[in-house]
Amino acid sequence: MNTLIRGALVAALVAMLAACAVPVSSVATAEPAATMMRTEVVWLGQSAFKITTPGGKVIVTDPWLRTNPLTPANYKQLDVFGRIDVLLVSHGHFDHIADAPALAQQYNVPIRAPGDLNQTLTTLGVLPANLLPRMNKGGTIEPVPGIKVTAVHAEHSSVYVWRNPVSNKDETHPGGEPVGWLIELENGFRIYHAGDTAAFGDMRLIGERFKPDLALVPIGGNFTMDPAEAAWAVKELLRPKAVIPMHYGANPLARGTAQQFIDAMGSSSVRVIVAVPGQPIPF
Ligand SMILES: [Zn+2]
């Protein structure tokens, strides 16, 4: 091999190594992004949401699905979720708890709900006690690693109506204090699920202390905030980066509409996202 050819081979080898070095280092820096997914929020009607976290966990809130007129047909099949890591129920009314016991059993996931509601479910034998842990407002729990959950005040009421299998009659049982939820995901993304509530002054505390990236607020009226009240609470008290209206369109008494909410938000800098049931919203 003459020196000219040898020189050319060495130069080619150096060029190859140099070319290799670039992708190797870029793969190394790209790795965290490949393992961390985005957050995905799917509205399932009323106050039910499926939230898929950046770490791939699934959070389900207030699951009224099988008889909810807004829930897409595929979500009425409860095995559609594949997995549920955190199951949150804000209070004992049917339009929030309806399918929670079935989901808890199917996915072997405890219902996180006001402690006195879970006590009622335990006493009635709705589920085994290990699926009904007690908690209350204040303090933060980490039901699965990386997901932080805090129960906060909600201005509402709560009972649990149960069909007694012996008498075949409905009975009304204590449903605990209704709550809203502060949910912080693995990457620090913060969601406030207001549950059913009127506006209340401590929403300012939630806004100042928790600084929600996303607020899920009821707008239907009659049972909860109406569009004007909700828009005022969002603009003046909660001040999230984005808001999704919920708890409208499924009960003829809750007449508030998304358009009324948009109009009431006016020129606010808060991003209003009108969710379509079943369609994922990325964050
Ligand atoms: Zn409700």
Image (cartoon, rainbow, N blue to C red):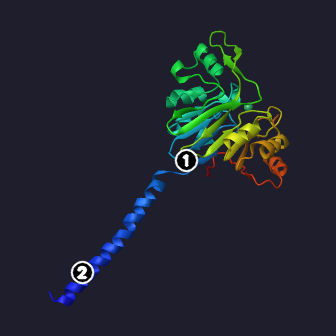
**Rendering coords of residue 259 (x, y %):** 81, 50
Q: First in sequence, mark 2 or 1: give its number.
A: 2
Residue at image mark 2? 10
Is 201 on the left or on the right of 150, as rendered? right
- Which residue occupies 77% across, 44% down? 234
Is 6 on the left or on the right of 25, as rendered? left
Query: Which element type, helix, strand or loop, lies under badge 1?
Result: loop
**Rendering coords of residue 211 (x, y %):** 68, 44
- Which residue occupies 55% across, 34% down? 86
Q: Residues within 10 Å of mark 1 (few under 14, many from 20)?
A: some
As drawn, the label of residue 187 is 1
* Quadrant of picture, ligand 1: top right
Residue 70 can be seen, yes or no: no
- Amino acid carrying label 1: it is Asn
Is 269 on the left or on the right of 76, as rendered? right
> In 3D space, how far apart are the residues under numbered discs 2 and 1 (Cα atoms)?
47 Å
